[in-house]
């Protein structure tokens, strides 16, 4: 039996593209808000005994999108769904995977627990900020990777003599995966985070002199990490041609103003989150809809996902 695919409010275009790839229509549901902002969700077709897939990235506004997902899951559970899978292309709170001061929460674990409480039985995510999150889930987490499609897009966008740059030590393994696909050397920026929005680059390991640059990261939020990396490679004598590839393009806060002045030739991101309509940056979007549609097709048929999984 075909699965039922419902879209949350976060990225309707991606959900529709996934359903279309599978030859299905999106499940009918209504999302409304009461005057006091309380959310009301109604599932408008039968899900009794069906496998249900809920498409909802949890990007900004994170709390609103998370609660949309919990409410949609609860509506489907009470309507008799046999099994529920949350497809969360961008997983909010992934960076809060440990306590920084000893008196702060582990937000990623809390979200995992809340998903379990809502009786979601499986999560499908794309390029988590930390692979350690898999240990937070007491139920299956399918961690997919968009790097193959991003690397394919980068292959036709950057010169063959480019250097792949990890903007910090945490992105080294990510850079290595791009390097294996694109057969390019790697350089690494030594970065220190000053605050949630500000970072400081202190040096670079690797030769970038006169070479075009491909900076890779899992996400672009305020642009601080990318800006520090771009400034560092330029100070180290890199060519002016800089491309940035990232799985998740949030571009929040001062990102547009910060990144526009860098004269980056191209930002390659996926559609894991819906891009702002007023985004004024040279962005190339590659869709994760084929990846997620294939994952849903295989999960619904109890088939292996081994070649889609993020191997880190």
Image (cartoon, rainbow, N blue to C red):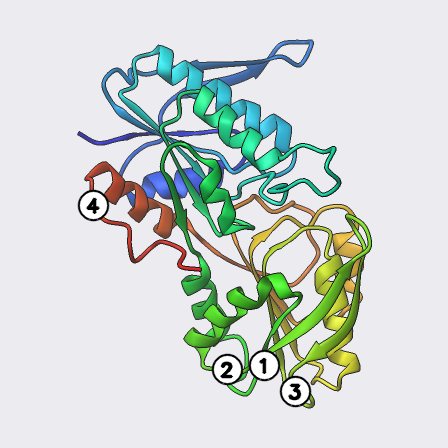
Distance from label 1 to label 4 (Cα)? 37 Å
Q: Is residue 271 above or below residue 28?
A: below
Distance from label 1 to label 2 (Cα)? 6 Å
Q: Secondary structure at mark 2?
A: loop
Q: Secondary structure at mark 1?
A: strand
Position of residue 142 in the picture relative to residue 275 (left or right): left
Report if residue 24 is visible in the image. yes
| Residue 304, x across and y down, in percent | 23, 49
Q: Nearer the viewer, mark 2 or mark 3?
A: 3
| Residue position marked by numbered label 1 in the rendering | 163
- 4 or 3: tag closer to the N-terminus: 3
| Residue 39, x across and y down, in percent | 58, 15
- Estimate how packed mark 3 is, as few (under 14), some (14 to 19) or many (20 or more) residues with alpha carbons within 10 Å: some
| Residue position marked by numbered label 3 in the rendering | 207
Q: Residue at x 76, y 83 (%)?
A: 236
Name the residue at the bottom extreme: 210
Report if residue 89 is visible in the image. no
Q: Say whether marks 3 and 1 touch (CB < 8 Å).
A: yes
- 4 or 2: tag closer to the N-terminus: 2
């Amino acid at each position: 039996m075909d699965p039922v695919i419902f879209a949350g409010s976060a990225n309707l275009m991606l959900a529709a593209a996934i359903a279309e790839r599978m030859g299905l229509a999106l499940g009918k549901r209504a999302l409304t808000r009461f005057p006091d902002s309380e959310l009301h969700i109604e599932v408008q077709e039968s899900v009794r005994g069906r496998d249900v897939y809920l498409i909802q990235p949890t990007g900004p506004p994170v709390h609103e999108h998370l609660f949309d997902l919990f409410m949609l899951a609860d509506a489907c559970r009470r309507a008799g769904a046999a099994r529920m899978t949350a497809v969360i292309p961008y997983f909010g709170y992934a960076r809060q995977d440990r306590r920084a001061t000893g008196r702060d929460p582990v937000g990623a674990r809390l979200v995992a627990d809340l998903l379990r409480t809502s009786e979601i039985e499986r999560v499908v995510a794309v390029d988590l900020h930390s692979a350690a999150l898999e240990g937070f889930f007491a139920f299956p987490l399918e961690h997919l990777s968009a790097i193959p499609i991003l690397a394919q897009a980068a292959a036709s966008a950057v010169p063959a003599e480019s250097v792949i740059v990890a903007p910090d030590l945490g992105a080294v393994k990510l850079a290595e995966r791009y390097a294996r696909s694109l057969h390019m050397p790697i350089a690494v920026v030594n970065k220190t985070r000053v605050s949630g929005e500000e970072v400081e680059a202190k040096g670079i390991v690797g030769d970038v002199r006169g070479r075009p640059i491909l900076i890779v990261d899992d996400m672009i939020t305020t642009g601080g990490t990318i800006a520090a990396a771009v400034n560092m490679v330029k100070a180290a004598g890199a060519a002016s041609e800089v491309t940035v590839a990232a799985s998740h393009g949030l571009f929040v806060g001062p990102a547009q103003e910060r990144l526009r002045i860098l004269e980056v030739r191209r930002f390659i991101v996926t559609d894991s989150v819906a891009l702002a309509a007023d985004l004024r940056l040279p962005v190339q979007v590659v869709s994760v809809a084929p990846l997620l549609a294939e994952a849903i097709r295989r999960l619904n048929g109890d088939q292996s996902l081994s070649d889609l999984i993020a191997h880190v």
